[in-house]
Image: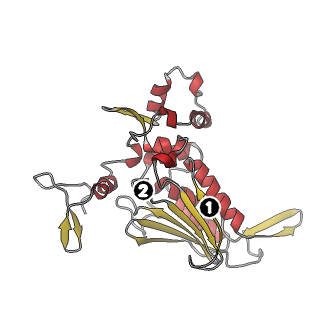
Amino acid sequence: KNSNVVSTQDGKYYIRVGSTKRQPSKDELARLFQRSRQIQFDETVIEAASLSDIDLARVDAFLQGLKQPALGESKLPLENLLLNLRILKADERGVFPTVAGVLAFGKNGQSLLPGAEIQAAYYRGDSRTSEVLDQKAIRGAVTEQIEAAVSFVKNNMRVGSVIQGVKRIEFPEYSWEAAREAITNAVAHRNYSLAGSGIRLFMYADRLEVLSPGRLPNTLTLESIKVVQFARNQLLASYLAGMGYMEKRGEGILRMIDWSRKNQAPEPKFELPAEELFQVTLFKRVSSSPESHS
């Protein structure tokens, strides 16, 4: 129950497995420190990366969105500015891009962070044994992944409409806003230390699932996520907030529920189906007519 990672007097770490204990692997120990907030993985450096792996045009666009001077207009040397933004980080070995810096501004983040992608699939039926109608491996910077995943949902769902007066009223199968929020949250809060494990976006005949690698961070529970705000990747979340993709008030879950309700759909479901997996399920609109659409 202690939120800190503790060791024995001789400096060994153990994890409990049922009624027994064993020493964790390096990956397990890293995740343990991350969950305790003693290590923030998105602020660690990637030694295999360098400044040349950062797309400076993306950084410029980010600064312009914040109404800050562009890179060429700054009085600071480029490296110092990127260090201040925590896109780069210095340690005793040198200066390297951070995980968050590569995710948000990298030229080819997947070559440095395998699994930092979204695997999307659209099935004819209600299970993964059904015929696959569309599929896509979505890569690139995190903002590109969000936009491409939302487009995948829009392209594969039906949208009914009626004309009321001079207005065209649409009633999509899923709330676009709820789907966008679920995808954005997965990209922002997934556990990137789980190398090789990507986000999965599955569309079925009756529902949409977003599966994100990693359990809920720290002390969050399925009951508390509706009211408690906590970001696993705080630096990455701050970049996404600066780009207009997130807010920091912790209202995303409540908005998903509200948008689904307004779209005449059942309330989303939030689950932990496996040890290192968080799942959001959005359900289709119950009514196929727009009479009660709001």
227 sits to left or right of 262: left
Q: Is residue 251 visible?
A: no
From the image, which quarter does the N terminus lie in?
bottom left
For residue 229, above or below residue 200: above
State the image coordinates of residue 118 (x, y, percent, origin top left). Answer: 55, 58
Kindly identify the residue that appears in the image at 58 percent across and 69 percent down.
202
Residues tagged 1 and 2 counted as in contact (Cβ below 8 A): no
2 sits to left or right of 99: left
Camera-nearest residue between 197 and 294: 197
Kindly identify the residue that appears in the image at 65 percent across and 77 percent down.
205
Instruction: State the mark number for residue 125.
Output: none
106 sits to left or right of 144: left
Q: Tell me the CA gap for discs 1 and 2.
A: 21 Å
State the image coordinates of residue 56 (x, y, percent, origin top left). Answer: 57, 33
- Kind of element beneath mark 1: strand
Among the two numbered marks 1 and 2 on one chain, the one whose residue lies closer to the N terminus: 1
For residue 283, above or below residue 75: below
Task: Read off the residue under disc 1.
Answer: 136
For residue 174, above or below residue 91: below
Q: Amino acid at mark 2?
A: Asn
Quarter of image, res 21: bottom left
Kindly identify the residue that appears in the image at 62 percent across and 74 percent down.
204
Task: Read off the residue under disc 2.
Answer: 191
State the image coordinates of residue 248 (x, y, percent, origin top left). Answer: 50, 50
Q: Is residue 293 visible?
A: yes
